[in-house]
Amino acid sequence: MDIGTTITFFVLAIASTASAIGVIAFKNAVNSALSMILTLVFLAMFYLQLNAMFIAIVQILIYAGAIMVLFLFVVTMLAPDQGDVGNRDPMVWQRGVATTLGIILVGALSYLIYTTFTISQQTKATGANSLSQVATKQGDIQAFGQALFHGFVFPFEVTSLLIVIAILGALIFGRRA
Amino acid sequence: MINQSLWVLLLPLIGFVILGILGRVMSRAAIRTVAWGACGLAFLFAVWNFFSMLGTPAGAGRVNDAMIYHWVISGSLQIDLGLLLDPLSATMLLVVTGVGLLIHIYAAGYMEDDPSFWRFFAYMNFFIFAMVLLVAADNFLFLLVGWGLVGLASFLLIGFWYQRRSAVAAAQKAFVINVIGDLGLMLAIFLLFNVFGKIDYTSVLGNPGLLSFGSGTATAIALLLFVACAAKSAQLPLYMWLPDAMEGPTPVSALIHAATMVTAGVYLVARTHVLFELAPIALNVVAGIGGATALFAATIALFQLDIKRVLAYSTISQLGYMFMAEGVHNYSAGIFHLVTHAFFKALLFLGAGAVIHALGGEQDMRKMGGLWSRMRITAWTFLAATFAISGIIPFAGFWSKDEILGSVLAQATATGNIWYYVLWGVGLLTAGLTAFYMFRLFFGIFTGSYRGGAVVAHTEEEEENGDEEAAGHGHHGPVGYYYIQEVPPVMSVPLIILGILSVIGGFLGSLALFNVPLARWAPLPNFLTPIFSDVKTAHEVSLGLDWTSTGASLVIALIGIGIAWSLYRKGFAYKENKNPLYQLVLHKYYVDELCNAVIITPILALGRFLNWGIEGGALDNGSKGIGSLLRGTSSVLRRLQTGYMRNYALAILLGVVLIVIYYAVRG
Amino acid sequence: MPLSAYLIMSAILFTIGTIGVLVRRNPLIIFMSIELMLNAVNLSFVAFSHFLDSADGQMFVFIVLTVAAAEVVVGLAIIVSIFRTRRNIDVDEMNVLRG
């Protein structure tokens, strides 16, 4: 791996970590949301680095563009400047415990990933399944579309059904009582 | 020879069942019919038995063992319910059912005011059934059953007036002491089974060779049997229940505690004499305790004031005589005294009952007197019985007591053992004391002037309210001297019959005293001889010795009567006596108080301690502890349900971390 | 970069999201933390897809994205309706199921 990829990776890593911490740290919910958008954009850049063009674009379009906008709507509707609503935290100890557990989790996972993890050559997809080959022949989007409609049609249709249900749910909740 | 013992056994049982179930709704006349009928028919069957036995020549032909029912069949062990008819059991059956019948008749009059009339007769019939079972059984198991059932009947009848606390306490005392005897009997039966492998009389008593003479086993068996006898027949040290048993109605005292139940011990020794012959130590114990009890009880009776108590102690004393006789190998003398004692003691009790009945429940001798002219029949029959018990010729008691003392003296001269002479002396002294206190009793009740005053008898309301004293007995209305009258015929006829028996009953015994052609006349001993024929050491009493003993006992009895005559002829004047020795004897040597302090109080204290420690401490706190432990745990665990979503999420995270760590560690 | 780098990155983001869920009391921010967790997982899927040279990972991301969207819609609707009834959206105030 060349030095450019490495530097990009580390820069993106630090940036996305910082903005993720910003998401959970800001008192003001709007600041939190904006920080979230930033994190999502950095993640899209990660995807680009991993040659997942379609996903990167979709991430920005849908996640950052639609979902976070929705979040911002609701945040602004529900008294955003209150921050963490109310001032008294009934369980101050939870912060310490959660942080400790989080650090333990990260540590354990990292240890696991570092020490036990290898990918053997046999698990790599080959031939017609090989994404990179299809991508070089026909382009990324084509490769993605081909995989989607040749193997994942059913989940695709089910997700559209899921979306219908979500819309219905939103309608029901949204009605005035 | 026909064995009708089954009918003798079953008829009272049927009577008990009928009275028990239907008695509540039956009329007085019907109850009387059932009760008298059951006992009377049983008596007739016993008489039939007796006559059919007389018709058979003496010897083995007079033994009939009728098997009724296979009770236990278990492998090689087989126990049958069988009824043995031989001279000894025939005699006992006659006494039990005959005297029992007379007392049933009497009791119909005595208990006529009682609201629980039916219950009384149900229990009486049950007692007759149990006693017949005890006497007629042909194996030790049913002897034990009968033994226990008569104890039960005694308990029920002593505590008949159960509203009275004292009666209930007396019943419990009798039962507890009886159980000690039951234990002795059971242990003896276990030992017998261990040695003989079977427990019917033929196998055990007919086969004494399996026990060696004087061995420890034989002595143990005999002593354990004697423990049972001591409990049932109120000998030292298990006699305490009998005086208290006087709480029961007087017919009960007459039947159970004079004539029949208490004689079960004497019967048992006679029946198992084979075993006692094998254990000379045990026989000496029997004789010794018999003599000691006789003297001990006689001394207490000297100063008692309750007429029934006097008679109770006299019963204990006379039972001591019976055991003395059996202790010197003369079993038929013991049985003979049993028979005559049944006559005159029952008569004494019934007579006392008549007096109590006429006086509206009064039992204290200090409040009696001068009844000779008011109650002629009672007085004459009581006098006859008093002469009988004092051993004056020709009344019944003379013959039997004389035979006992004669055998003791014979044994003394034959073995030369000083203790037998002492025993003879004790017997003689007791005879004198007996004469004295019995005549004191007689004079106290019947002569002099009436000391009772207008006794206010119990009113109707007192009886309904369960007043302690009112749950007793008697007429209603004030009892002044001129209201006292003789008892009705239903009560006085049995008195007369028993009176006649007390006079002539002695002629059942031996007239060998007089060198007359009739000297061969000895119906009862001859009747019983086949049973006791194996008693090798029964001594023929030589004539000279016999006269010595008889003369001595007559003389001392007359001295006793003379002293009583001089002191009490004009009536019984009670003087408070502060002499400590007198007080000691008056309070029955404080034996009851001693038992209470030494035995009862520690056991009760132990029970209280265990209750506090184990019941209260371990068990209660244990179960409470489990409860509070659960409650504590749940109140701690409840804190997990905080209601905060964030806590639940934390718990989930904790689980996830643990899983990841597990994989990390596993490598 | 080796695969494990991306996976560790994903782990870090996931943990940050978890801590956010546990520490914050504003439900909207909790929701955003959950979205962050989902995104971390998306990252690891895409990384696998790249390194295994297969489209399956990206398919999964596609589906997750859609599901996340639907979930956000419904979740926000619920939060809004809670706000309408209680005028208060502190999750610690929602402790009716307290034992």
Image: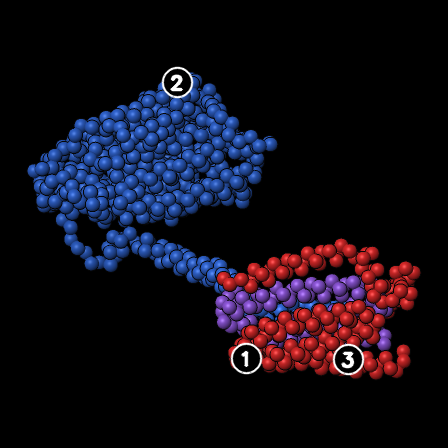
Quadrant in which the N terminus of chain B appears: top left
Mark number displayed over residue B52: 2
Please tell me if label 1 and label 3 are on a single chain. yes
Q: In the rendered image of this protein, which colour is used for chain B? A: blue
Nearest-to-viewer mark from 1 and 2 = 1
Q: In the rendered image of this protein, which colour is used for chain C? A: purple
Residue highlighted by disc 3:
A13
The quarter holding residue B22 reads: top left
Q: Is residue B185 above or below residue C76?
A: above
Query: Relative to residue B378, is residue B15 drawn left or right?
Result: right
Numbered disc 1: secondary structure:
helix
Residue highlighted by disc 1:
A82
Q: Residue furthest left?
A: B482
Identify the mark nearer the N-term, 1 or 3: 3
Q: State the red chain.
A: A
Name the foreground residue: B4 vs B564: B4
Please tell me if label 1 and label 2 are on a single chain. no
Task: Specify the amino acid type for callout 1.
Answer: Gln
Across and down, in percent, residue C79 comes to 57, 68
**Residue at 79% across / 57% down in the picture?**
A152
Task: Specify the amino acid type for callout 3.
Answer: Ala
Name the foreground residue: B228 vs B81: B81
Name the foreground residue: A5 vs B577: A5
What's the chain of the residue with tag 1?
A
**Residue at 33% across / 53% down in the picture?**
B591
Asked whether the beta carbons under mark 2 and mark 3 sit within 8 Å of each other, the answer is no
Name the foreground residue: B22 vs B252: B22
What's the chain of the residue with tag 2?
B
